[in-house]
Image: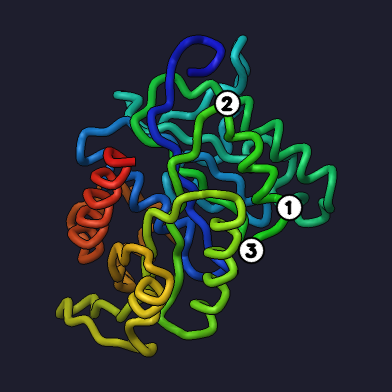
Amino acid sequence: ADANGKSVRHVVLVLSGKGGVGKSTITTELALALRQAGKRVGILDVDLCGPSIPRMLSVGRPDVHQCDSGWVPVYTDAQKSLALMSIGFLLEDPDEAIVWRGPKKTALIGQFVSDVAWGELDVLLVDTPPGTSDEHLAVLENLKKHRVDGAVLVTTPQAVSTGDVRREITFCNKTGVRILGIIENMSGFVCPHCSECSNIFSKGGGEELAKLTGSVFLGSVPLDPLLSASVEEGKDFTQLFPNSATFSVISKISQTLLNSLQTA
C-alpha cells in the first residue's frame, strides 16, 4: 500500500530489447483489454525517448497535479478505470528528453516511479525504456515498494529482435524478476479490406524463444493497420479497439496474464 493506504495489487513491467517493436502499443492494448475485463488499470509510461501512450489514449498534455501522496495520474474515462501517468507530462517540451544523460535521467525516473498516487489498482503496467540499462534498474529499485509481479517481454518475429530479448531475459534472471511471458508483436499483417492475415516476416521467433528459455508464450499479435491508423490520427483507439482483429488475441493474452498473476 502507498502512503494514503490505497493499494496496487499487481505490477507488470513491459520490456523489449530494442525500440520499434511496438511495446507502447502492446502496453496500451493490454491496458484496454484488462479494462474491458472489468479491472482497474494503471499505465506508468517511463519511456523518456518518446512517450507515445498519451497520444494513443488521446489525453494530450494535461496539467499534472500533486497531492500529499504524490503525482495524481490522469484518468482516461469518467469511471476512473484507466489511469495514466507519463513522464512526458512532466517535461516542459516533449522533445527535450533525448538530451538527458545518466544520473540525472535515472534520478528523475526514480522519483517519478515512486511518487505517483495510484489509489486502488488491480494491475499497473509499466512501459519501460527499451534496452537493459541503468534506467531499468532505477525503475525496478523504485517500484520495490509495490512488489513487482513480473515482466512481459515484447519481441517481433525476426530473429534479430529475439536476440535482443534474450538479453532482457538474462536481465530478469539477474534481478530476480519473474518472466510472465513473451508476446510476439507484428506477427503477420491483417488486411484492412478482407481481414486475411499474411506473414510479412518470418514467423514463430517469439514461440521459439519461449521454448528455449522455458518461458510462457503468451501469443502473437498481428499488425492491424486500422488500429495503427487510429493511433496515429489520435482517434479514439479505445472505441475502435474492441472491434479490431487484435482484440481477441490481446484479450486472451490479458486473461492468461491475469491467471498467472493470481498464481504468483
Q: Which mark is residue 116?
A: 2
Given the image, on which type of amino acid does mark 2 rest? Answer: Val
Question: In screen coordinates, is 220 left or right of 69?
Answer: left
Element type at marker 2? loop
Identify the residue at image location x=39%, y=21%.
120
| Residue 50 position within the rendered picture, expressed as x and y whole percent measured from the top left | 63, 55
Q: In the rendered view, would you say 23 is above or below 120?
A: below
Q: Is residue 55 visible?
A: no
The residue located at (30%, 67%) in the rendering is: 226
Image-based side of 79 in relation to 111, left or right: left
Q: Quadrant of the C terminus?
A: top left
Which residue matches tag 1? 134
68 lies above or below 178: above
Upstream in sequence: badge 1 or badge 2: 2
Badge 2: how crowded within 10 Å, few (<14), some, or many (20+)?
Answer: some
Residue at image mark 3:
131
